[in-house]
Amino acid sequence: MKKILSYTLSLILLMACSSKPVTANRPMPEVIDSAFAFAQRQALLMAQKYEGQEGRLPRSFVDGKDKSSDSRWWCSGFFPGTLWYLYENGKDEQILKYAQLYTDRVEREKYTTNNHDVGFMLYCSFGNGLRLTGEERYEEVLLTGAKSLATRYKENIGLIRSWDHNKENWQYPVIIDNIMNLELLLWAAAYSGDSTFYKMAISHADKTIEHHFRPDFSSFHVVSYDTVTALPHKKQTHQGYADSSAWSRGQAWGLYGYTYLYRLTKEERYLQQAVNIAEFLINHPNMPADGIPYWDFDTPEIPDTPRDASAGCIMAAALTELCGFVDGERADKFLNMAIKQVKTLASEEYTAKQGENGCFILKHSTGAFPLNSEIDVPLPYADYYYLEALSRLKRIYKEK
Ligand code: GLY
């Protein structure tokens, strides 16, 4: 009761005090500071809202109603991760307390072996927590999680299996999103000294370059491998417009994946892959002028179809890192695209009002359009990668 009362009071207070609007025309350092200040207040409201709901984590806000999940949902690590980015940038003790509390809610996922999402769940929550606090307990969680993820790797195929459903259609499905989970394996290799984790990550990354990408560097969503020949037997989509289309978030996962793979391995082929994906995305004729993609680059309904802010956030987070790995005009091009995307996201069009939007920071993401699920709603991964992009931009402006 006390918690509900304190949440309601905070909500009323925050809605009453007019916060300075974040607009796209202000100087970038101001946009960044303002976006962080807003995000911190909004995330505190979110944290207070779910504090008394044991084990629950924010999932979305649909038709005016909160949607939460337990830790099993693939997005469970994103809200704790959002809090860690806020703590990193604001050093607020209340935020730290909530970052720890919500991170602990995800711990049981270290035993997850029935899907590949354990990387998303644990690396965004415990991974950031370890990076920022050095908490030793988090190391065990991450290592156990990496071992669980590794059980999904089959030596003769050389990839981690993403999903177990739809067995009558897919023998061994691997989705482009899976490239994001390798960071946990690379952490485990460095931490434990066991090179098996490293070899798995490299094999998965190389085979994904070989089989997931088209000549223009767009990617398929699902590639299913024949378990006998270890070659693709199907290339399809699940969340995109068509098997042959460029599903926006999938393209962004690929860009982000090969960018961090280059950071952690220094293998030039990963840098080249990330650069090629970035060029494909930035130069795409269907990329809107404000930098936030529609949910699929090839849907014939453009421009009368929803955007996917989450794809814009993931792209911006990746580009703010990738721009540091290339030189000259290319570095400027990547950084300028990320700046444009973040300015758009920080505008009133995309940033919610304090206390609204289910206390999520950003509006207008699309989870799975063809499945009629989570269309034009807030999603926790949009907020997470937006804050990562803001953090990286803050560092870049500090160094300027
Ligand atoms: N990894 C699931 C998605 O991007 O929707």
Image (cartoon, rainbow, N blue to C red):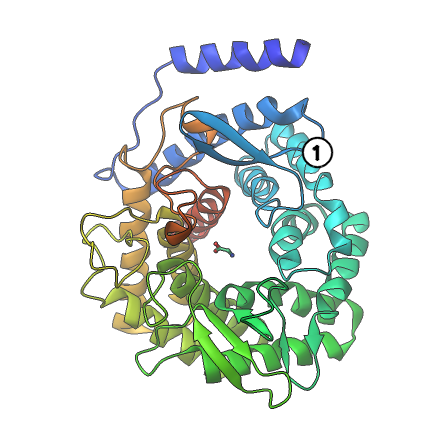
Q: Residue under label 1, please give it.
A: 55
Q: Quadrant of residue 288?
A: bottom left
How far across and how far down the image is residue 269, in percent? 47, 83
Left or right of residue 252, residue 115 in this image: right
Which residue is drawn at the image coordinates 20% and 54% (left, top)? 301
User: Residue 375 sits in which quadrant?
Assistant: top left
The reply, left or right, for residue 342 in relation to residue 374 is: left
Q: Quadrant of the N terminus?
A: top right
**Label 1 C-beta lies within 8 Å of the nearest ligand 1 atom:** no
Query: Where's the C terminus, which quadrant?
Result: bottom left
Give the image quarter of residue 295: bottom left
Residue 208, percent from left and from top: 51, 78
SS at circle 1: loop
**Residue at point 42% right, 55% down?**
314
**Where is residue 204 shown, x and y percent of the image?**
59, 77
Q: Please name the amino acid that badge 1 sits on.
A: Gly
Horizontal side, residue 138 vs residue 322: left or right: right
Name of the residue lying farthest toward the front:
168
What residue occupies the far bottom of the structure in this picture? Answer: 229
Residue at position x 43%, y 48% from top? 367
Is any part of residue 267 visible from this angle? no
Please name whichever residue, 275 or 277, is drawn nearer the observer in this view of the structure: 277
